[in-house]
Image: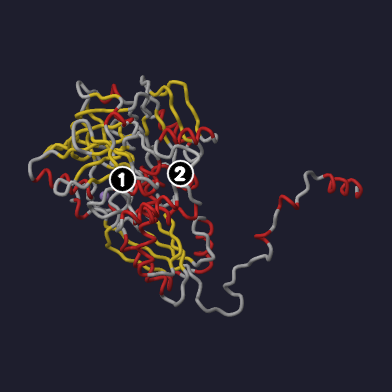
């Protein structure tokens, strides 16, 4: 990878200056949304317990919600500022159809960050290191009915590999259960590997939790990249310029300098405390378990910070997972099957479990190979539907139409039982006792549907009905301003 080339590539396709907003900060994006009637401001007092999340959920996918008086706090809370694909494409500066390609280009051409001094870093304008009380400092909501207290749901957790020093960025759910202690869920990925490494040596792992960053940095944090690949470099590539970062006040972790709020701390070795239940992305609760613990060492923020919360399982949460995954899945499938033209993780499949694939089939049987390839790409994928290129895979009714008219279950269905699936899918636990060890959880059946038509068919049996000229009709020039002409005709014939 040549960083010089990457820089030219990145800036050629999208420079931050080309956008009608300050792309580097959350507040720049929010000002843009506000100027285009996409922000709903709630200035009445709202409770942090359930009420704030309830209102944000009602606005999900329509407008970003800004709460000016959350709980007893002076810090506003924002939610839902990236809850539509079109908005995310706009933040990237591309057409919606080019979203995945743009994300992939950025992931393939990362840009190293540039470090700025503390005095230039907005996120360190105010520094708290003594007597920290997270509940008093920050407006942290409790979201769902059975959640075990307030949760940080939109924090970019940044840590350094104890062996190599390379950073990792991920979003982890964090339960704030004491003034300066938080329990964190570590799934078996990179942050978890760093923590295991540090813990084996008897060390704490330094971390930072950045809250309130722009949509592109949020998205970059969700890239499915190899270990020792700093996701902040993808954020730089998406922005078309190196991301400005600053060293934390109490450790060596580098955080986005324009973040609204940063919580600094250390994951303690050999300490576990209760976390959960918590309502997760499949719209079910994760059970209470003993989790790793972050001891907070500092809280830094802008002079007038904004706190970001993601309402679990709503569109902001789902799309944040979907777009980086789709970009990765598309490149995975295309490596073996160049005929794959697009992929889509459906909202009904919680943007994780159901994958729709658009494919230019050349030979019979190929669609089943694509199905098998998709199952191997990520354990979360439970159902795959492969359709032809005349089917719009961003429209659920088009997929249903393809299944209704191009699929026969006895010859086109692929079932693979006993495979690894998502442990958060509650149907994988049916018939299991409560105390099943983790290595036996998430066993799932994969289902693939080949809903492609035959490569060769007689006459027009599989030709989609089309009306010539339909696409070119320009209603603006054809339709009269009012119905006077028709009304006159009706009155004459009475
Ligand atoms: Mn990573």
Q: Position of residue 471 (x, y in %)?
A: 65, 60
Q: Is residue 123 left or right of residue 463?
A: left
Observer-nearest residue: 277 or 244?
A: 244
Residue holding disc 2:
91
Q: Earlier in the sequence, mark 1 or mark 2?
A: 2
What whole-number distance in Å separates the C-alpha atoms at marks 1 and 2?
17 Å
Residue drawn at point x = 54 percent, y = 62 percent: 401
Is the shortest distance between ligand 1 and the CB of mark 1 under 8 Å?
Answer: no
Do we see residue 190 in this rendering? yes
Q: Are marks 1 and 2 in contact (CB under 8 Å)?
A: no
The quadrant the N terminus occupies is bottom left
Image vertical order of residue 262 relative to residue 418, above or below: above
Observer-nearest residue: 344 or 86?
A: 86
Task: Look at the numbered disc 2 and give the secondary structure of its residue.
Answer: helix
Image vertical order of residue 270 relative to residue 359, above or below: above
Chosen colour scheme: secondary structure
Residue holding disc 1:
232
Residue drawn at point x = 35 percent, y = 46 percent: 236
The disc label shown at residue 248, or none: none
Picture quadrant where residue 372 is located? bottom left
Circle 2: is it few (<14), some (14-19), or many (20+) Cα within 10 Å? many
Image vertical order of residue 462 relative to residue 152, above or below: below
Q: Position of residue 492 (x, y in %)?
A: 92, 48
């Amino acid at each position: 990878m040549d960083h010089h080339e990457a820089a030219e590539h990145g800036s050629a396709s999208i420079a931050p200056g080309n956008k009608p907003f300050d792309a580097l900060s959350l507040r720049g994006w929010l000002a843009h949304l506000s100027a285009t009637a996409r922000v709903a401001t709630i200035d009445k007092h709202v409770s942090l317990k359930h009420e704030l999340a309830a209102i944000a959920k009602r606005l999900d996918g329509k407008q970003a919600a800004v709460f000016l008086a959350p709980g007893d706090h002076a810090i506003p809370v924002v939610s839902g500022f990236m809850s539509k694909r079109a908005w995310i494409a706009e933040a990237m500066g591309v057409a919606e159809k080019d979203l995945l390609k743009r994300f992939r280009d950025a992931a393939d051409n990362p840009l190293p960050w540039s470090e700025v001094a503390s005095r230039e870093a907005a996120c360190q304008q105010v520094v708290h290191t003594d007597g920290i009380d997270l509940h008093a400092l920050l407006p942290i909501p409790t979201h769902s009915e059975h959640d075990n207290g307030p949760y940080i749901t939109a924090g970019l957790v940044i840590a350094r590999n104890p062996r190599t020093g390379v950073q990792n960025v991920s979003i982890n759910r964090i339960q704030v259960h004491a003034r300066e202690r938080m329990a964190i869920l570590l799934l078996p990925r990179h942050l978890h590997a760093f923590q295991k490494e540090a813990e084996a040596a008897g060390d704490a792992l330094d971390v930072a939790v950045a809250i309130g960053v722009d949509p592109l940095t949020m998205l970059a944090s969700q890239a499915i990249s190899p270990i020792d690949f700093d996701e902040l470099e993808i954020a730089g590539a998406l922005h078309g310029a190196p991301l400005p970062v600053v060293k934390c006040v109490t450790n060596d972790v580098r955080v986005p300098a324009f973040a609204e709020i940063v919580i600094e701390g250390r994951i303690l070795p050999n300490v576990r405390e209760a976390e959960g239940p918590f309502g997760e992305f499949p719209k079910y609760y994760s059970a209470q378990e003993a989790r790793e613990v972050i001891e907070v060492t500092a809280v830094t923020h802008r002079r007038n910070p904004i706190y970001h919360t993601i309402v679990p399982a709503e569109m902001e949460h789902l799309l944040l997972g979907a777009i980086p995954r789709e970009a990765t899945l598309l490149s995975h499938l295309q490596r073996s099957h160049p005929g794959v033209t697009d992929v889509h993780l459906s909202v009904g499949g919680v943007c994780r479990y159901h994958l729709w694939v658009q494919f230019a089939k050349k030979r019979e049987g190929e669609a089943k190979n694509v199905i098998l390839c998709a199952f191997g790409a990520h354990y979360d994928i439970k159902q795959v539907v492969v359709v032809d290129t005349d089917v719009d895979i961003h429209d659920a009714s088009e997929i249903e139409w393809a299944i209704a008219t191009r699929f026969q279950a006895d010859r086109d269905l692929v079932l693979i039982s006993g495979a690894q699936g998502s442990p958060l899918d509650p149907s994988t636990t049916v018939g299991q006792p409560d105390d099943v060890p983790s290595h036996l959880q998430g066993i799932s059946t994969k289902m693939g549907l080949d809903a492609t038509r035959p490569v060769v068919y007689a006459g027009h049996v599989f030709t989609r009905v089309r009306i010539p000229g339909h696409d070119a009709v320009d209603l603006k020039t054809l339709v009269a301003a009012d119905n006077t002409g028709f009304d006159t005709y009706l009155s004459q014939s009475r």
